[in-house]
Amino acid sequence: MLEGIRGYVMVRVVVKYKMLLDSTDVLCPRIRKRVEKEKALARLCTARQNLNDKCEVKMGGAGYIVDLEDKSCTCGWWTLSDIPYCHAVSAISHLRKEVDSYVHPTYLVRNAKYAYKYGIPCLDGRQAWPDAVGYPVHPPKQRSMPGRPKKNRRKSAHEVEVRPQRNGVGEEVVRRGSVIHCKKCGGEGHNARTCTAPTAAPTAAAANNNGGGGRGKRPRTAAPNLGNTEPTARKTRVGHCSKCGSTTHNARTCPLNRGVGIQAVQINVGDRRTIEREMRAATRGVGVYVSEETGNQYAILNGSRGRAVGGTQHDEVQLRGSQPPPTQP
């Protein structure tokens, strides 16, 4: 890059020097255009002479003081650029003087020739460069920057695509070349969060795809549905209590945990309040208590280990080592 800049400057210096040699003007070409522009604007100004080469210049409703000895104007443009502004040009023309004599000598052609006189020297190619002496120069060590590294590639300006949002409010930047798919309906151009398709029960093929694919793996393609059969709905799993077999609770919340002396039970009606009421009545005796209302049976043993009791409320069950059940009123 530096070699290219050196070659460009070398050619530019030659072109500028030839242009100045062919010029017959006192000022440089660009400075001459600027002065002529200020002369055209000076026609809108009105100057009034004062002593010591000072003038009062009016331009519209504004007024300025121009001092030709100090080469200054109250607007400040002459001091900044060293080129007379339209106010100063109006005062100089009012005093019958030359505008070119009040331009800074740096902008004269004779002084600009000295700047382009020597030019940029020519250099040999890399094959003629002398070998460097000393320690070799190495690039700086690469260090990891703080924060999480970015994985997405920075796209150039021609790769960015802007389109209006789906709701019609504002715009969004999209990726070009990648098409997203919905996991719910399989459609393109949207995801499951913005999907408007009705929710359907998952098929067996979809369940296998979701279970078989790990993180980062592509899910297996579902088998095509050749017939007109509808997908089978997933069966709801019903839990049972491991102590009493009821479907309304589990072993941790089983009412038998609060029963004293009850070793086995046969439940026909699994209402929690009904079971607690019957257990309070069953713990008054020893044997098998059968509820006439629900048919639930409770085995009450005194120091022995019982088994599950079967039958209905009309069966007479006698456990080993127990007393007959109390007569129901």
Image (cartoon, grey):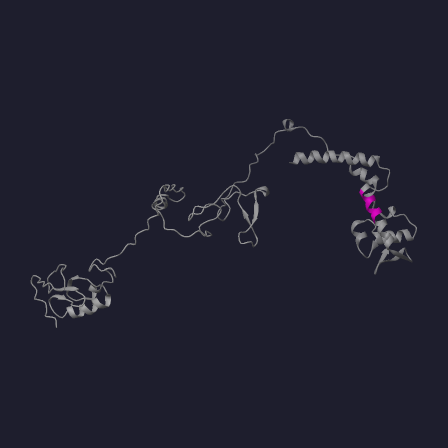
210 to 245, vertically: above or below: above
Is 325 positioned to the left or the right of 26 in the image? left
Dominant SS in magenta = helix
Which residue is situated farthest in the bottom direction here?
329
Q: Quadrant of the C terminus?
A: bottom left
157 to 272, vertically: above or below: above
Residue displayed at 86% across by 48% down: 102
Tell me where residue 305 appears, x and y as whole percent: 12, 60
Is 213 positioned to the left or the right of 49 in the image? left
Which residue is situated farthest in the right direction here?
96
Tally of marks: 0
Q: Which residues fall within the magenta stretch?
A: 30-37
Residue 70 in view of the camera: no
Is 306 positioned to the left or the right of 76 in the image? left
Front in this rendered view, residue 191 or 142:
191
Residue 74 is one of the magenta-drawn residues: no
Residue displayed at 78% across by 51% down: 80
Is 174 positioned to the left or the right of 112 in the image? left
Which residue is situated farthest in the top direction here?
127
Front in this rendered view, residue 156 or 211:
211
Residue 7 in view of the camera: yes
The quarter holding residue 214 reads top left
Q: In which quarter of the image is the N terminus?
A: top right
234 to 287, vertically: above or below: above
Tell me where residue 18 appears, x and y as whole percent: 80, 34
Residue displayed at 88% across by 56% down: 46
Tell me where residue 164 appears, x and y as whole percent: 56, 50
